[in-house]
Structure formats: structure tokens, C-alpha cells
Image (cartoon, rainbow, N blue to C red):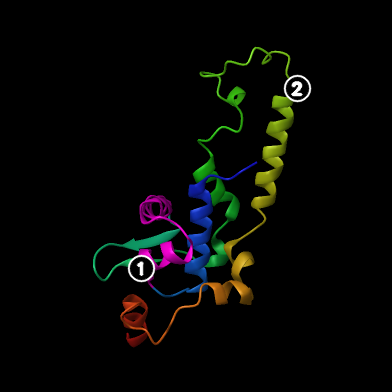
Amino acid sequence: MRLTTRTNIAIRALMYCAVHDGQTIRSAQIAEACNASANHLAQVVNALHVNGFVHAIRGRMGGVRLARPARAVNIGEVFRLFEADVPFTECHVEETNTCPLLAACRLRDAISRALSAFYREMDLVTLEDLVKGNIKLESVFALAADDDEAFPCAARAAAG
């Protein structure tokens, strides 16, 4: 199994926001820290915003921040948001299936059970589980607090 790029970016962006909880972070900062293109990140942030995971503020003073506490962000829910429309195998999409084994195949049911088990496990994980006390992650996502020009949103929020 391999997650889509959008899911990977979504989880990275949420982790970045959680590490910097309470701050409004520029999308460019998140894209750079998460090794994501600005275009992909913009699409992901829009979906996260529409679904209530982040607040996205447009414009010069804008940025992104968590819309709910990290403990209330369920990773299974995030995965479903980005993965639900991506069928794992072609036989899971009746309209486009070309497999002649469909009527006799037992693998399809096994894959469905495996995917259900995967999502059950992801439902047990929160964003807080991924970031709380994760010193290595915090150092990867560290902001230069004294660099007001590089991080104007964070500096303005701190000056508040």
C-alpha cells in the first residue's frame, strides 16, 4: 500500500501546524519544511480548511493554523479525506473494472478486510500522538524565532 502525495502532504502540514500550535504559519514555510510544492500544498490546505482541520487565512498577513486541538484530529479521518476516492484495486470500482475474475476472486474481499483493518488502526491515532513530546520532530520543524522577516506571521503573533 502506498499513500497518495496529497495524504503525505496533509499529514506533514498538520504535524507542522501542531508543532507550532497557536501560530499562524505561512504556506511557503510549510511547503519548504515539508518538502512539498506550493501548488500541491495549496490544494491540500484548501481541503483541510473546507473539512475543518485548519483555518486558512488568505493575503499578505495570512497563513495556516490548526482549527482544532491536535488531540481532536483523527489521522484515520484525514486519510479517508484524501484516500477515499482512490480505489486500491480496479475491481473496487464496478464501472471501470475489466478483471474477468471478479465473480470468482477471493482476493478482493481479503483486500477489503485489510483496508478496513488499516483504517481501524489509523482511527486510534491522533495528531497529538504524532507530535507530543516528539523532540526530533520539533527540531526538524524549528522556526527561527529571531528572524522576523523570514517568519512575519509568527513574529506578529508573538508581538500580539
Image height of 132 relative to 156, above or below: above
Residue extending furthest toward the left: 60
Left or right of 148 on screen, residue 72: right
Which residue is nearer to you in this view: 56 or 150? 150
Q: Secondary structure at mark 1?
A: loop
Image height of 140 relative to 122, above or below: below
Q: Residue 23: percent from the left, percent from the top?
A: 41, 75
The quarter in which the C terminus is drawn is bottom left
Is residue 80 one of those drawn in magenta?
no
Q: Residue 7: percent from the left, percent from the top?
A: 52, 49
Dot 2 or dot 1, earlier in sequence: 1
Image height of 127 relative to 156, above or below: above
The tag on residue 106 is 2
The tag on residue 35 is none
Identify which amino acid the numbered label 2 is placed on. Arg
Q: Residue 82: percent from the left, percent from the top?
A: 50, 45
**CA neighbours of label 2 inside 10 A, class few (<14), some (14 to 19), many (20+):** few
Identify the residue under disc 1. Answer: 26
Q: Secondary structure at mark 2?
A: loop
Which residue is nearer to you in this view: 86 or 70? 86
Q: Residue at x 61, y 61 (%)?
A: 126
The magenta stretch spans which residues? Answer: 24-51
Q: Residue at x 51, y 18 (%)?
A: 95
